[in-house]
Amino acid sequence: MARLLMVRSLVLSILMAVASQAAAQQPERIGDFTYLSAVDPMSDMDRSQLSVSSGSRLFPSVLVWRCTGESIQVFLTVGQLINIERTALVQVRFDSDPALPQRPWSLSTDGAAAFATPAITQEFTARARPASRVRLRVWDYQGTPLDREFSLMGLAQGLSRLACASAMPTLEELESGVITKEAAIEGWERTFPHVMVLGNAITKEYVMRGAVCWRDVVDVENAVRFPNFVAARRDGYTRQEKCRPE
């Protein structure tokens, strides 16, 4: 009960914060979505968002596309605690299409919201654009499946208002090999554990045979086309060699 009250308080505080911003930013209704134009007052970072709700007013579920500068996040709240672990399994089904395989989403520090990874975000968004409804199933800390359904009416039009969504590939582009910078970074970090992201390049530094340090730099400032990360290394990298410091 205490956890439910905590999550309820969190959800209500988020909604109140959005409402307070709404008075100043004048949110717009786009289909079943609410579009809110927002800028961080300290950094001028774009914090605009597009959200759709379902369920009761007491414990609403919310699906959100949110800008964090030039990047875009997709996250889900289900009106209750999901888990206190770092990730939760989420399964997605669009319209009458077969359900997609379960995939891990990252959890917020309080365990009340599940965030799609960059790679999942671009695929989820590409599949959501032409769909009319989406069903999401997330498993909570007790292993109980929590099913939520959202209307996607107005999503395509709403995404056109988010500057951070402008580079998101369509489903056709995704299937042909288009990938966003964030998804490329995620893939490289998963493939190479010691990847560091510097500016608009992906950098991996390591020592070869204890003597030579060399660096692979892949520029992914813009969406690039390649079927896998091996091709990315061939197409856009430079190699710099330097001797080990004496």
Image: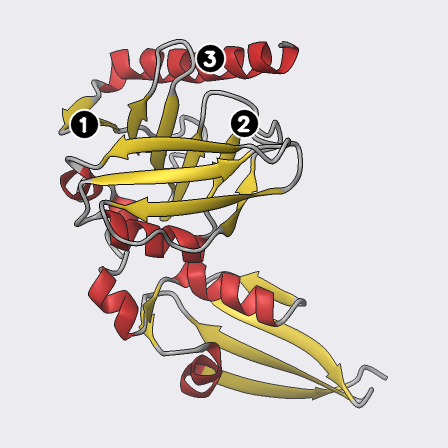
Q: State the SS at label 3.
A: helix
Distance (Cα) linking label 2 and label 3: 13 Å
Label 3 Cα crowd, 10 Å radius (few <14 / some 14-19 / many 20+): few
Which quadrant of the rendered structure holds the N terminus?
Answer: top right
Amino acid, disc 3: Ser
- Residue under label 2, please give it: 112
Picture layout, residue 219 above or below residue 2: below
User: Residue placed at 35% from the left, 11% from the top?
Assistant: 57
User: Residue placed at 61% from the left, 80% from the top?
Assistant: 215
- Give the numbered dot on residue 129: none
N-terminal label among 2 and 1: 1
Q: State the SS at label 2.
A: loop
- Residue under label 1, please give it: 32
Distance (Cα) linking label 3 and label 1: 22 Å
Distance (Cα) linking label 2 and label 1: 23 Å
User: Residue placed at 66% from the left, 32% from the top?
Assistant: 84
Q: Depth-wise, is mark 2 or mark 3 nearer the camera? A: 2
Q: x, y percentage for residue 16?
A: 39, 11
Q: x, y percentage for residue 22?
A: 28, 16
Picture layout, residue 222 above or below residue 116: below
Amino acid, disc 2: Ala
Q: Are marks 2 and 1 in contact (CB under 8 Å)?
A: no
User: Residue placed at 48% from the left, 83% from the top?
Assistant: 230
N-terminal label among 3 and 1: 3
- Residue under label 3, please give it: 13
Amino acid, disc 1: Asp
Could you say which is closer to the camera, residue 201 or residue 71? Answer: 71
Q: Is residue 219 visible?
A: yes
